[in-house]
Amino acid sequence: MKRYKSIITLAAALLAFASTFSGCKPSYLKGDEPIVLIETDMGDIKLKLYNETPKHRDNFIKLAEEGFFDGVIFHRVIENFMIQGGDPSTKENAVDSIDDAGYTIDAEFVPELYHKKGALAAARMGDAENPEKKSSGSQFYIVQGKTFTPEELQQQLQQKNKMKETSTINKLLMERADKLMDEGKNPDFTKLYTEMQDTINSVLKSMVKYEYSEEQTNTYTTLGGTPHLDGDYTVFGEVIEGLEVVDKIAAVKTGTADNPIEPVKMKIKVLKK
């Protein structure tokens, strides 16, 4: 790029001139995502935060600037899966408790943002207590994952759609059961399932099945990731430097509940926003 310094300088001048009249930053400029740095005992991880997920982006920046993450550890580490942190109680190594910022963030699912290796995503409570899939206010994870063969990826897809069908059926049954209980009746789920068979079949027939894009398929079979989490947890950033550090952290020895035996502490800085 340095060989074209004069051309770049001229382009920059023209761009600045045009911006003066437009009053806004040209939409075709790239690299305008916020950048954060996670400093750890095992090395640094630099990430960009996606502008397509503004609620998660802004919340992460806010917490980082407040020093919320400083001294927090990666309290849940599973090799070939992910490394998780963001629990403020772990500053005192209280890994047996589960804590966060005390609030949730609405899910921001973007099909183009998926769980490839290095993806930054928000942890959350399970579907039973959190059907809207809202994110934890502070707990996050970085995907390490693994690579999949095309056949394994197809199996992942079939399992994912099967779980979606099961979840849909359970929701329909529970909605009907709730109405019966409001009427003072005790629901028999076996009988309900039989009675609602036509409705269930109709809903399942119209249900849009999850599919992996060509890009996702190529990525999961080469770089790797955790495809079964797509569409269920909000991905809001990705590692741009330090994937080897993610691998090192993922490989540490762990004890009860996947807690690292030797704590890996973090400090997060906002480099650009």
Image (cartoon, rainbow, N blue to C red):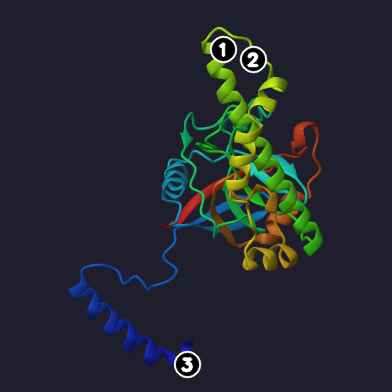
Please name the residue that numbered disc 2 is placed on. Answer: 187
Q: Which mark is residue 111?
A: none
Q: How many marks?
A: 3
Q: Quadrant of residue 176?
A: top right
For label 3, the SS is helix
For label 2, the SS is loop
Please name the residue that numbered disc 1 is placed on. Answer: 181
Marks 3/1: CA–CA distance: 75 Å
Mark 2 or mark 3, which is nearer to you? Answer: 2
Residue 150 lies left or right of residue 13; in this view the side is right
> Could you say where residue 130 lies in the image, as x and y percent from the top left?
56, 31
For label 1, the SS is helix
Please name the residue that numbered disc 3 is placed on. Answer: 3
> Could you say where residue 263 lies in the image, as x and y percent from the top left?
71, 39
Label 1 crowd (10 A; few <14 / some 14-19 / many >=20): few
Q: Mark 2 or mark 1, which has the lower sequence index?
A: 1
> Could you say where residue 217 lies in the image, as x and y percent from the top left?
69, 64
Q: Amino acid at mark 3?
A: Arg
